[in-house]
Image (tube, rainbow, N blue to C red):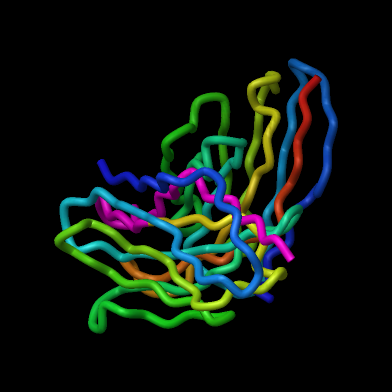
């Protein structure tokens, strides 16, 4: 158990509404990640964080923002959800040092945008 | 930019048969390589990893993988597949773009079906 909790696990929303997904860790790791998983695309990195208030963009960051005000929580926000953001979102934490280590994943949050 | 190719979208094997899942990567430096497994409705679980040293790495659940630099490959193998191995498998390569930017890039996955 990697000590990662994602919430909500399932959410259905309408186009244009804001959505926030939460990732909570109990391991006190510095590095956290948000990925999305879509059929035929594997996992693609949205944003990541390398410390409190330190975040950066990944491969598919358009339409998403993140915040990390404390070590244990990493929030992913869709300011105005679109149908193309229907996906399964995974949070991950990384053990190891600055440039090493593996990722441990949460159980995922399934988001449907109607 | 780094990338990972998993040529096989779907593989079907009989229980007890051997398995090899292919993974090719593109990265300019010495790669860190990973295999993850995902059961339906679950998150990803790390099977094994390669950072350095012995190019044949052992993982959990009887899996192993061999790093071949000359072929830019990191293929996953198992000598005898069990029905419980049916899942989707992802290969990943780590890349560093600068301070704090260590991140994993994943392949699109290979779905494994097992015939009893």
> Relative to A33, is A108 on the left or the right?
right
Residue A40 position by quadrant: top right
Q: Position of residue A79 (x, y in %)?
A: 66, 25
Asked whether the viewer can see residue A30, the reply is no
Tell me what residue is drawn at x 74 percent, y 46 percent. Answer: A109
Residue B113 in magenta stretch: yes
Tell me what residue is drawn at x 76 percent, y 36 percent. Answer: A111
> Relative to B35, is A99 on the left or the right?
left
Asked whether the viewer can see residue B101, the reply is yes
- In the picture, the quarter occupied by the C terminus of chain A is top right
- Pick the residue in front: A78 or A111: A111
B104 over B2 or under it: above or below: below
Residue A112 in magenta stretch: no
Q: Position of residue B94 (x, y in %)?
A: 34, 58
Q: Position of residue A11 (x, y in %)?
A: 83, 37
- Pick the residue in front: B104 or B53: B53
Q: Position of residue B22 (x, y in %)?
A: 39, 56
Residue at the extreme top: A16
> Relative to B45, is A45 on the left or the right?
left
Residue A19 position by quadrant: top right
- In the picture, the quarter occupied by the N terminus of chain A is bottom right
Residue B56 position by quadrant: bottom left
A38 over A48 or under it: above or below: above
B91 over A62 or under it: above or below: below
Magenta extent: B93-116
Q: How many marks?
A: 0
Tell me what residue is drawn at x 26 percent, y 77 percent. Answer: B55
A81 over A74 or under it: above or below: above
């Amino acid at each position: 158990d990697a000590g990662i909790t994602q919430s909500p696990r399932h959410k259905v929303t309408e186009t244009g509404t804001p959505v926030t997904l939460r990732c909570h860790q109990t391991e006190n790791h510095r590095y956290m990640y948000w990925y999305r998983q879509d059929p035929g695309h594997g996992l693609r990195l949205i944003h990541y964080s390398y410390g409190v208030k330190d975040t950066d963009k990944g491969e598919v960051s358009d339409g998403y923002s993140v915040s990390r005000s404390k070590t244990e929580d990493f929030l992913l926000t869709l300011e105005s959800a679109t149908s193309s953001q229907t996906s399964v979102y995974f949070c991950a934490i990384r053990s190891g040092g600055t440039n090493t280590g593996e990722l441990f994943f949460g159980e995922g949050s399934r988001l449907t945008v109607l | 930019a780094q990338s990972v190719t998993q040529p096989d979208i779907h593989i079907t094997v009989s229980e007890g048969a051997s398995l090899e899942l292919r993974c090719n990567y593109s990265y300019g430096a010495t790669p860190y390589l990973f295999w993850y497994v995902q059961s339906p409705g679950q998150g990803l679980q790390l099977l094994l990893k390669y950072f350095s040293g012995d190019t044949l790495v052992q993982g959990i659940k009887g899996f192993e993988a061999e790093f071949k630099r000359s072929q830019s490959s990191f293929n996953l193998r198992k000598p005898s597949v069990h029905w419980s191995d049916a899942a989707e498998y992802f290969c990943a390569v780590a890349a560093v773009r600068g301070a704090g930017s260590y991140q994993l890039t994943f392949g699109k996955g290979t779905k494994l079906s097992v015939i009893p």
